[in-house]
Image (cartoon, helix red, strand yellow):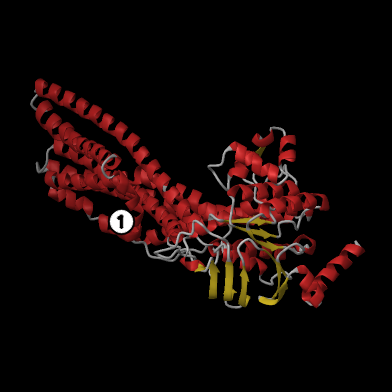
Amino acid sequence: MKESQKKNLIRSRFYYSADQVIEKPFNWRQMGRLFSYLKPYSKTLLPLSFLTVIIGTIVRLVVPILIGVYTLDYAIANKDMDLLTILVLSIAGLYFLSYLANTFRIRWMNMLGQNVIYDLRQHLFTHVQSLSHRFFDQRSAGSILVRIMNDINSLQELFTSGVINLLMDFLLLIGVFIILFTLSPELTIAIMVILPVMFFISTSLRKKIRRSWQMVRLKQSKLNSHLNESIQGIRVTQSFTQEKENIDFFDGVNTETFESWRDATQKNAMFRPFVEMTNAVGTAILIWYGASLIANDTITIGVFVSFAFYLGMFWEPISRLGQVYNQLLMGMASSERIFEFLDEKPIVSQAENAVILDDMKGKIDFENVEFSYDTTRIALNGVSFGIEAGQTVALVGHTGSGKTTIANLISRFYDATGGVVKIDHHPIKDLSIESLRAQISVVLQDTFIFSGTIMENIRFGRPDATNDEIISAAKAVGAHEFILELSNGYETEVEERGNILSVGERQLLSFARALLANPRILILDEATASIDTESEMKIQQALKELLKGRTAIMIAHRLSTIREADKIIVLDHGNIMEQGNHAELMESKGIYYELVKAQFRMLDVG
């Protein structure tokens, strides 16, 4: 492949993502929504932080008057040593008070910020847990991870210092302006003529800076998505010797992320020097015009010195306000992405007066059910069938025939686009989602093993289970023997995906997990597709225990595993072609018969 083609491939892969730059004007209403997370602390940390800010601001506003006007114009000019001593002690006391106020301000602000970040992350994670499968179908795990971690982390500085500093600088600006105007209206007006120019230029920078930080968040999202994908798929990458291509792709992603950060920081860097230049112009006006006012006896030297103090204090918060505004821009970019997730509504929603079905029997009815994952692909086309409580039903058909879709509709991971799915004669949409899924267990082909011990993984389906109950469930499905052979038995630590376990061992663990949960409906989705013959024999024994007294839906390509099913439903392109038990379908010599023959021919060839 040519170098240019590789770069194009990298660029096209890089830009493909569900994340997009959100084009919305900056609005304080959304920031108000973000700041609403401060409300739980409106009677504790927030007022305490505000109190320290007010104390610190008052001290800063009082000290220059004491130094300039009272010390120079009164104490020193009149050689009043007693007054000078009082002023020195007062100024020292005020600085000590300011020190205490700043110490507590920093402590309480950090506590406030960390609590808000905790609440926001908890809220977002909890909300994501409630979203429907379609949401996760359209987004990579890395993209979701970025919202919960990076985007919320980027708000940390805003909440730990930005909000309080904004108040402090706002109060300081107002106080300084009033005092300056009181000391010398003429000098104040002369210096402030440069403010309109500063306001005009800074306003023109805001939109560019905001878009730059939005782009940074977007690039970071894609970088994390690729990292997650690369780590999860490292075996495939190495199997196909695609390491160089993957590194080239990462280089493209990393470069784009680096360039977005550089662009954003360059635009940020333009603001502070601009403020400093404005400060220099203001200082020049102060010296030139102030000196003439002193010469004309319009102001005293003490007033001039105080004015110089206050002028420095005036530009300082303006410069910081620019930084706070940049924090707000970053916060806006992140909050847009966070609220985009928070505004997502579950497609599968619960009825207001949902029926809590605690004593589920397990009868399932599909009445003319239709379903489509999108407008162009029909997954189920008017499907109707019934499953009696306690029956074992197998779903058979080629890939894409609708088997997994039926399982998803029973678990209500999706809602049918037409017709009705019923459980125990209740339309599934009328049932409490929690009570429904609490009595359904799904065992997948690719069993997910969580980081933790074997004991914790089995207990996942029923957190209140005792150790004895967990061991009993493992014994019942034939997992007890191999667990005892592990280094620490049931306390053996397994990493994510359970790579120290074989496919068959992971499947037995999933059966133990399902048995411990004691569901009324059990769904086995290709649960024996990836295991060897010896493991399959163990799992067949485990299945006999697992299926006792439960309604079971088995999806299987290995037709040998479903011979004992009470009913077999044969699907093709979302339609039921035939149904019956193994003997009936073999006798009718239809599609199922041909599938069995084809599978036996493959075994003979093998």
- Of the 4 image quadrants, the one containing the N terminus is bottom right
User: Residue 347: x, y in percent?
Assistant: 49, 66
- The answer to which of 201 and 141 lies nearer the viewer is 141
The residue furthest right is 605
Q: Residue at x 71, y 45 (%)?
A: 499
- The answer to which of 310 and 283 lies nearer the viewer is 310
- Asked if 367 appears above or below 200 in the picture, the reply is below
Left or right placement of residue 556 versus residue 167 in this view: right
Residue identified by numbered label 1: 198
Q: Residue at x 17, y 34 (%)?
A: 68
Report if residue 315 is visible in the image: no
Left or right placement of residue 232 versus residue 43 in this view: right
User: Residue 169: x, y in percent?
Assistant: 27, 45
Q: Amino acid at mark 1?
A: Met
Left or right placement of residue 111 versus residue 494 in this view: left
- Of the 4 image quadrants, the one containing the C terminus is bottom right
Left or right placement of residue 357 versus residue 119 in this view: right
- Asked if 87 appears above or below 314 in the picture, the reply is above
Report if residue 356 is visible in the image: yes
- The answer to which of 467 and 67 lies nearer the viewer is 467
Tally of numbered discs:
1
User: Residue 37: x, y in percent?
Assistant: 35, 50
| Secondary element at tag 1 | helix
